[in-house]
Image: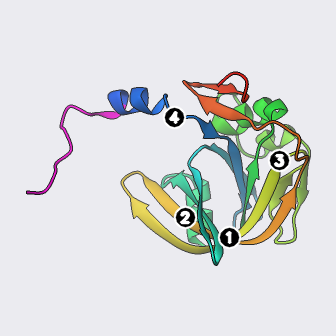
Amino acid sequence: MRAQASPTVGPVLFKQGMRALVGGVAVVTAYDASGASLGLTATSVSSLSVDPPSLLVCVNAASAMAQALADGAAFGVNLLAHEQAEVAQAFGGQRPVRGVGRFAYGAWHRGALDTPLLAGARVAFECVVAQTMAYATHRIVVGRVAEIHFGDPAARPLLYHDGRYATTEEA
């Protein structure tokens, strides 16, 4: 007999349960076909493979980022340092900023693959899209890592836990 998901587990209960998970915070960035800067805060970033070096990110299928990645745009994954919570908030929608206005937070430059990279990030990965898959409201994007830019190895990571940003001492 195949196991079934409980019909009582809906979005509210699921979010409540997921608040117990501590996640690193990243800002995923790209340029769309018209050259507009795109970015979003994500905790759904994971290492996938070391051979070939790959990671995965999950983005809302209705977002401009999902469309750009489906079109094959190169993308950056900027893992934030603890002092970059304001950047995470700007790209996460907690602040009333949209589009290019988000890039007013933090110092940005273009990477080797022409992706927006955040100065001071603990590490930034530049990726090419290897595969995308649809699942429910999101797109799972596999990125083949083409470039890695290391920041300060002593910088503490920015974490997300229980609905708030934290550092390793606070989580």
Q: Which of marks 3 and 2 is in front?
A: 3
What is the CA distance from the residue labelled 3 to the residue labelled 1? Answer: 23 Å
- Can see residue 138? yes
Contact between marks 4 and 3 (CB within 8 A): the answer is no
Up-down relation of residue 7 to residue 114 (above or below): above
Up-down relation of residue 29 to residue 68 (above or below): above
Q: Which of marks 4 and 1 is in front?
A: 4
Query: With 42 as the anchor, is 81 left or right in this view?
Result: right
What is the CA distance from the residue labelled 4 to the residue labelled 2? Answer: 21 Å
Pointer 4 or 2: first along the chain: 4
Q: Residue 141 carries which label?
A: 2
Q: Which residue lies furthest to the top in this view?
A: 170
What is the CA distance from the residue labelled 3 to the residue labelled 2? Answer: 22 Å
Give the amino acid type for the residue marked by disc 3 in the picture: Arg
Q: Quadrant location of residue 166?
A: top right
What is the CA distance from the residue labelled 4 to the residue labelled 3? Answer: 21 Å
Check the picture and name the quadrant holding the N terminus: bottom left
- Dot 3 falls on a residue whose secondary structure is loop
- The range drawn in magenta is 1-11
Up-down relation of residue 119 to residue 54 (above or below): above
Relative image position of residue 41 (x, y in whole percent): 66, 43
Q: Residues within 10 Å of mark 3 (few under 14, many from 20)?
A: many
Contact between marks 3 and 1 (CB within 8 A): the answer is no
Q: Provide the residue designation for mark 4.
A: 21
Q: Residue 122 carries which label?
A: 3
Pointer 3 or 2: first along the chain: 3
Pointer 4 or 3: first along the chain: 4
Relative image position of residue 126 (x, y in whole percent): 76, 66
Q: Residue 51 carries which label?
A: none
